[in-house]
Amino acid sequence: MAIKLDKVSYQDKLKNISYEFTEGKITTVISSSGSGKTLLSYLLSGLITDYTGTITNSYIGRELGYVFQNPEESFIFSNVKEELSFGLNKYNYKVDNIEKRIEDTLKMIGLDNSYLDKNPFNLSSGEKSLLSLGVVLSLNPKLIIIDEPTIYLDNKKEEYLIKLLKRLKNNYHKTIIIFTSNIEFALKISDNYVILKKGKITSKGTNKELMTNMDKVKNAGISIPQIVDFINTANKKKNINLEMTFDIKELMKDIYRNVN
């Protein structure tokens, strides 16, 4: 068990939420803007404590890392090196270990040592997002909570993030909880999913089940890529079994295989 919520409510924004996040898996909490996903992320990370119900969290201190939707909320220094070293100094890492950890973290997030003296606030939006994740990863947390990680990323950086998070899960057994309104991203990365609408859970399950629950996604006010809509409609109405893909060429090949 990573985190378990039992009948959790907060003001009138979150209502009677019960769910258990699975350890060592990537879970996406999917909702449209204003449905309470950021508030729920604050509750899970301990930033909000005046809720009702019970939250059982086995991760404490640096075992839990939280990545804000707006990366600048996590920046406090005028250069990248200080941002990455602050937490390491706080937890009394040795100087040699700090230098190595900073170098490894930059490499992990796709940046290099040329960024060390740069002002975080002057980086591109995508670089800021990756750096804010790096600040968290530098402390090697067991649980990583991320709010809207793709908002400032272009397609290339988004694909890089997907590979990175999957590697963290598969190679290092990290538990990752992502709050997002990006259904395409969720489909590509999730092991499990939760759909949140107006502060309530309306659907939950595995990634495979998410692929067949697009009606519930739409009902939550989340837009669906046309290719996803087409695949689901074709599978239901034509009684075929097209694989979920975001590559039109792969879709055409799959259609050909199913009709021949």
Image (cartoon, grey):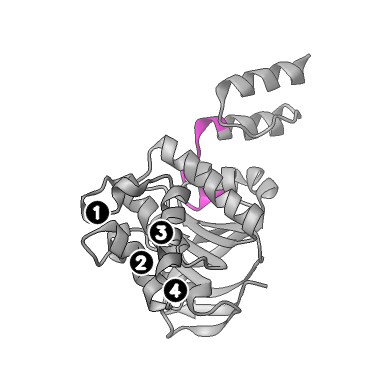
Q: Earlier in the sequence, mark 4 or mark 2?
A: 2
Cα separation, mark 4 vs mark 2, equals 9 Å
Cα separation, mark 1 vs mark 4, equals 21 Å
**For residue 249, side relative to residue 157 (left or right):** right
| Residue tagged 1 | 117
Name the amino acid, label 1: Asp
| Residue tagged 4 | 93
Q: Is residue 223 magenta?
A: yes
| Residue tagged 2 | 85
Residue 253, by quadrant, is top right
Disc 4 to disc 2: CB gap under 8 Å: no
| Residue tagged 3 | 102
Circle 1 — which element?
loop
Name the amino acid, label 3: Ile
Disc 3 to disc 2: CB gap under 8 Å: yes
Cα separation, mark 1 vs mark 3, equals 13 Å
Mark nearer the viewer, 4 or 2? 4
Q: Earlier in the sequence, mark 1 or mark 3?
A: 3
Residue placed at 45% from the left, 59% from the top?
A: 100
Circle 3 — which element?
helix
Q: Position of residue 97 (x, y in %)?
A: 46, 66
Of residues 146 and 111, the one drawn nearer to the viewer in this rendering: 111
Disc 3 to disc 4: CB gap under 8 Å: no
Disc 4: CA contacts within 10 A as few (<14), some (14-19) or many (>=20): some
Name the amino acid, label 4: Tyr
Circle 2 — which element?
helix
Residue placed at 24% from the left, 54% from the top?
A: 117
Q: Which residues are magenta?
A: 217-227
Cα separation, mark 3 vs mark 2, equals 7 Å
Disc 2: CA contacts within 10 A as few (<14), some (14-19) or many (>=20): some
